[in-house]
């Protein structure tokens, strides 16, 4: 199986729209993973039907037993995440701030603190017309997004029945969830846009991605909104040895498709659809090249 | 007064709103703009200006092999799997370490001490007469965004008016940014993606007890669902910015619409007044 991740650095460049389109256009058997776990949107375009769902437990969270607590404040003094609050009458742990390090359990002289499992979200496997989709929902305000990405990828691998390709829709950024997404990927497709922000973020995310694979390719979305910036990005890619395998024009038909909750398909002929179809063909060539 | 600009979905225009709001307000008063999107900070692109750099570090354990007898207590205490103790040596994985200090406390021999390890930097600049820009930048390849966000916010803690530009999403980095904010602007776009993620971001702000309002960006007139959602959740729609290739072009080249089209100064002044009203903070 060839593993492909779609990432961008900057958010909103069109990762999800292009991932959903590729899922329809690649002539391969697929398993899909939505690794943007804190704002998972791939399902919106693929009409998923739930196969199973299970809770996701992140790090355990500290809980103080008020009956045993003597109010000595040792936990508060040692907690580096400022998660302990309250006063000598009653100390409490703020679960949003608690990192689950258990230092408070270690320092409590009267063993009044225990670590409890906490549900931080759900992991789902769903079927779609283009392959099974592993996805998740991180409870808003929960941490552990990198860990959840890892679990989503694991769910995809476990559900896989010999697909040709894993296609993962990645998160924006360069931190924990992004690193968790690109780990173990064969090919990384970066989606950018011709803006100073898009270009800046592209450079950063490519230097992270390079630590995981040399097979990095690029597509420029809405390239015609600033053709000179597009040229500048293309020049940079040439210097860096990154192939630009697609250029998708700005096209209101894309917004219409997203509003109808559907992906670009083979039967679509509007300009952006044609460009994404060409991108899919190039991606297959990249995947099949050794 | 601390205003956070967040969104859930990426690319809805958080940075654009934060930059224009801060610039407009700085024409009549002091304002500090903090880029808390430390994985991909972009505000400096709109305000190029030389700055002073401070390194951000986190404490990580250093193991004294002379004293250590490989008892394994540190590895047992570490909840993050960052330490593995073998018979004759210790393996430490800094990317998994949360700098909690648990191993140092746990070691019965006192063989562990902590040393600072670099994870990023904070750059402070003054791009306009009454505007201070504080940018948190996570080192490329480092996973720990939270310490860099904290360091950036810390530098603005004594300032009266602060605007935080958050990362996209709803996880740790966003919570870290919203913590301590008086009000939150949720920037969205009128698509199913925008609405889905607005719902999540609104839930985070609500759970943190921060009053929020909505800014609809790139509006092409099909905003009914966003208005309905906002009304149901008692989120005032603070501003609507139309989709316009001219605005996109200004934004894409790193400029501010309130600088090139003065009408936007009035609109962002109005947005600021609405944020003040929403926060309930008296100035």
Image: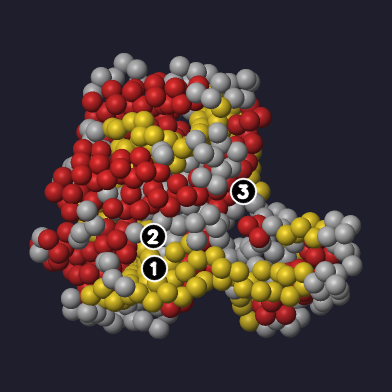
Is A277 situated above or below B175? above
Structural crowding at the residue carrying mark 3, measured as other residues with C-alpha within 10 Å and reported as few (<14), some (14–19) or many (≥20): some
Same chain letter for marks 1 and 2:
yes
Colour scheme employed for the rendering of this structure: secondary structure
Q: Which residue is mark 3?
A: A147
Between the residue at mark 3 and the residue at mark 2, the CA separation in whole angstroms equals 24 Å
> Does A117 sit above or below residue B21?
above
Viewer-closest of B273 and A182: A182
Q: Which is in the foreground here, disc 3 or disc 2? A: 2
How many numbered tags mark residues here? 3
Secondary structure at badge 2 equals: loop
For this orientation, the residue located farthest to the front is: A239
Q: Residue visible at 46% across and 75% down?
A: B54
Foreground residue among B205 and B101 = B101
* Residue B10 is at least partly visible in this image: no
Query: What residue is at 51 percent from the left and 39 percent from the top?
Result: A214
- Residue A36, percent across and down? 49, 43
Q: Label 3: state its secondary structure.
A: helix
What is the CA distance from the residue labelled 1 to the residue labelled 2? 7 Å
Is A192 displayed left or right of B65 in the figure? Answer: left
As drawn, B231 above or below A71: above
10 Å crowding of disc 2: few (<14), some (14-19), many (20+):
many
How far is mark 3 from mark 1, CA to CA?
27 Å
Q: Which residue is mark 1?
A: B135
Q: Check residue B41 in the rendering and tell me which mark sits there, or answer none.
A: 2
Check whether the beta carbons of the residues at disc 3 and disc 1 lie within 8 A of each other. Answer: no
Q: Residue at x 77, y 69 (%)?
A: B63
Q: Earlier in the sequence, mark 1 or mark 2?
A: 2
Could you tell me if the residues under marks 1 and 2 are in contact, i.e. CB atoms within 8 Å? Answer: yes
């Amino acid at each position: 199986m060839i593993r492909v991740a779609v990432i961008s650095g900057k958010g909103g460049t069109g990762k999800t729209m292009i991932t959903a389109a590729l899922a329809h256009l690649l002539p391969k058997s697929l398993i899909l993973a939505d690794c943007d776990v804190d704002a998972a949107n791939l399902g919106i375009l693929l009409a998923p039907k739930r196969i199973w769902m299970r809770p996701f437990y992140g790090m355990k969270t500290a809980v103080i037993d008020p009956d045993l607590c003597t109010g000595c404040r040792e936990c508060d003094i040692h907690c580096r995440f400022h998660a302990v609050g309250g006063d000598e009458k009653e100390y409490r742990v703020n679960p949003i701030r608690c990192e689950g390090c258990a230092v408070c359990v270690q320092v409590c002289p009267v063993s009044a603190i225990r670590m409890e499992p906490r549900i931080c979200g759900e992991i789902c496997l769903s079927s779609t017309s283009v392959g099974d989709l592993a996805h998740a929902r991180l409870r808003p305000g929960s941490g552990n997004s990198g860990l959840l990405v890892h679990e989503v990828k694991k769910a995809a691998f476990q559900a896989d029945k010999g697909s040709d390709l894993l296609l993962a829709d990645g998160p924006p950024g360069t931190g924990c969830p992004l690193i968790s997404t690109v780990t173990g990927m064969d090919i990384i497709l970066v989606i950018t846009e011709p803006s100073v922000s898009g270009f800046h973020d592209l450079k950063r995310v490519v230097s992270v991605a390079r630590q995981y694979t040399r097979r990095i390719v690029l597509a420029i979305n809405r390239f015609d909104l600033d053709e000179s910036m597009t040229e500048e990005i293309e020049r940079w890619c040439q210097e860096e040895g990154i192939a630009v395998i697609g250029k998708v024009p700005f096209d209101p038909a894309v917004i219409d498709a997203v509003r109808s909750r559907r992906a670009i398909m083979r039967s679509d002929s509007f300009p952006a659809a044609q460009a994404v179809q060409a991108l899919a063909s190039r991606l297959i060539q990249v995947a099949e090249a050794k | 007064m601390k205003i956070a600009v967040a969104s859930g979905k990426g690319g809805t225009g958080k940075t654009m709103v934060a930059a224009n709001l801060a610039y407009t307000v700085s024409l009549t008063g002091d304002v500090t703009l903090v880029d808390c999107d430390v994985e991909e900070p972009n505000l400096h692109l709109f305000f190029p200006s030389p700055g002073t750099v401070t390194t951000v570090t986190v404490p990580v354990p250093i193991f004294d092999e002379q004293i250590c007898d490989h008892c394994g207590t540190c590895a047992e205490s570490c909840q993050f799997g960052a330490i593995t103790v073998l018979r004759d040596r210790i393996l430490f994985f800094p990317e998994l370490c949360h700098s909690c200090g648990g191993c140092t406390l746990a070691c019965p021999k006192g063989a562990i001490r902590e040393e600072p390890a670099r994870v990023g930097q904070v750059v402070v600049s003054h791009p306009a007469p009454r505007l201070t820009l504080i940018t948190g930048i996570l080192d490329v390849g480092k996973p720990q965004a939270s310490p860099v966000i904290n360091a950036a916010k810390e530098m603005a803690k004594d300032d009266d008016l602060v605007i935080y530009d958050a990362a996209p999403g709803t996880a740790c980095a966003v919570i870290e940014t919203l913590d301590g904010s008086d009000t939150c602007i949720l920037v969205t776009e009128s698509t199913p993606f925008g609405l889905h993620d607005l719902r999540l971001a609104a839930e985070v702000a609500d759970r943190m007890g921060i009053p929020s309002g909505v800014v609809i960006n790139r509006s092409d007139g099909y905003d009914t669902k966003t208005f309905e959602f906002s009304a149901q959740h008692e989120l005032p729609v603070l501003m609507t910015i139309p989709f316009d290739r001219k605005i996109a072009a200004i934004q894409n080249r790193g400029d501010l619409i309130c600088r090139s089209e003065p009408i936007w100064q009035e609109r962002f002044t109005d947005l600021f007044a609405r944020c003040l009203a929403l926060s309930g903070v008296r100035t």
